[in-house]
Amino acid sequence: MKFEVTVTLKKDVLDPQGKVVSQTLKNIGIKNLTQVRQGKYFEIDVDEKDSSKAIDQVKEMCEKLLVNQIIEDFKIKKAG
Amino acid sequence: MKSSVIVFPGSNCDRDIAIALEKLQFKNSMVWHKETELPKSDLIVLPGGFSYGDYLRSGAIAAKSNILSEVVDAGKKGALVLGICNGFQILIECGLLKGALLRNSGLKFISKDIFVKVISNKNKFFNKYQSEEVLKLNIAHNEGNYFTNKEHLKELEDNDLIPIKYCNEKGEIDSNSNPNGSINNIAGIFNNNKNILGMMPHPERMSDKLLSSEDGLPLFLSLIN
């Protein structure tokens, strides 16, 4: 079973990379841009047919390693 | 005094710290990250470097290595633990210290000599320094921008848990003397019991006059008591 996990910085955490990307987009003429926040993306394949068990496993991966929950939030989406 | 320096793939300040410790007659062991037992140690050092190539987040993979569970146990039981640079990042990732080390506000890797002021010397690590003493140390990092929430920041300030802050040569602590954007110019923090110290500057690089200066040496001398 395949999952997509996105990890983003929490709203109140400064994202200097996102700021620089945002500024550069403005510099090259992109209009109507209000904000860019940069994050991470994981594709995870779990050998488990029960979808709720599989989601629990991915959640455990996020909490134990993939995400630093002090500064980051995560979203899990079933792929395909 | 017995010390252990933990070595990860990608550690690069492990020998520097070992030389500084041995100069002061510490009986030091180098401990590979795959080991599951820690030699009996009064001091455990997590050295600087780029453990596991900084994959995922700086220090995140090292924080899950075999030896770290031993380090966490020892730290919780009161052993002295010192994390320098990448070691500070590992201490945060394994939960022994709170907060986060974000990318430097200027988005650049910074390698230079900086000044820090001793804010608190009433602890095991800084008792050989004068209060408000200005030290010249070296930093070399990309993720040293310390961040924490308001409640924890207040806890750090109120309980004397910030031993050093970035300053200029005159000891002035302001945004101009803050190299990486750290909240309140924080260069290092303690846990509540003050037996675990994480700091971004490298005292071991300032422990021999022949190479640089000796401003870092009193930190190791402080531990011998």
Image (cartoon, coloured by chain):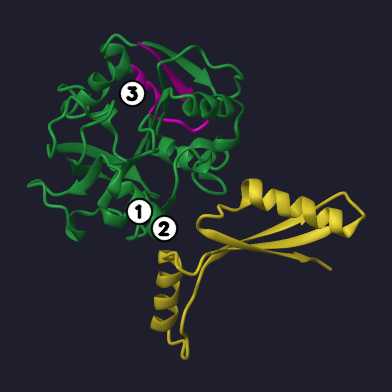
Q: Secondary structure at mark 2?
A: loop
Dot placed on the residue nearer the N-terminal end, 3 or 1:
3
Query: As shown in the figure, which amino acid type bears the numbered disc 2?
Result: Asn
Answer whether residue B17 is magenta in the image: yes
Image spot of residue A24 (x, y percent) = 41, 76
With A80 as the anchor, is B116 left or right in this view?
A: left
**Crowdedness near tag 2: few (<14), some (14–19) or many (≥20) residues, C-alpha within 10 Å:** some
Chain to which the residue tagged by mark 2 belongs: B
Task: Chain letter for green, please.
Answer: B
With B224 as the anchor, is B59 left or right in this view?
A: right
Q: Nearer the viewer, residue B128 or B3?
A: B128
Task: Chain letter for yellow, please.
Answer: A
Query: Which mark is in front, 3 or 2?
Result: 2
Dot placed on the residue nearer the N-terminal end, 3 or 2:
3
Q: Secondary structure at mark 3?
A: helix
Residue labelled with disc 1: B153
Q: Is residue A51 above or below residue B157?
A: below
Residue B16, label in figure:
3
Chain to which the residue tagged by mark 1 belongs: B
Q: CA distance from mark 2 to mark 1?
A: 6 Å
Query: As shown in the figure, which amino acid type bears the numbered disc 3?
Result: Asp
Could you tell me if the residues under marks 2 and 1 are in contact, i.e. CB atoms within 8 Å?
yes
> The N terminus of chain B appears in which quarter of the rendering?
top left
Task: Name which residue lies at 45% across and 46% down.
Answer: B98
Q: Secondary structure at mark 1?
A: helix
Question: Looking at the rendering, which quadrant does residue B66 occupy?
Answer: top right
Task: Name which residue lies at 19% across and 22% down.
Answer: B208
Question: Looking at the rendering, which quadrant does residue A69 occupy?
Answer: bottom right
Residue labelled with disc 2: B149
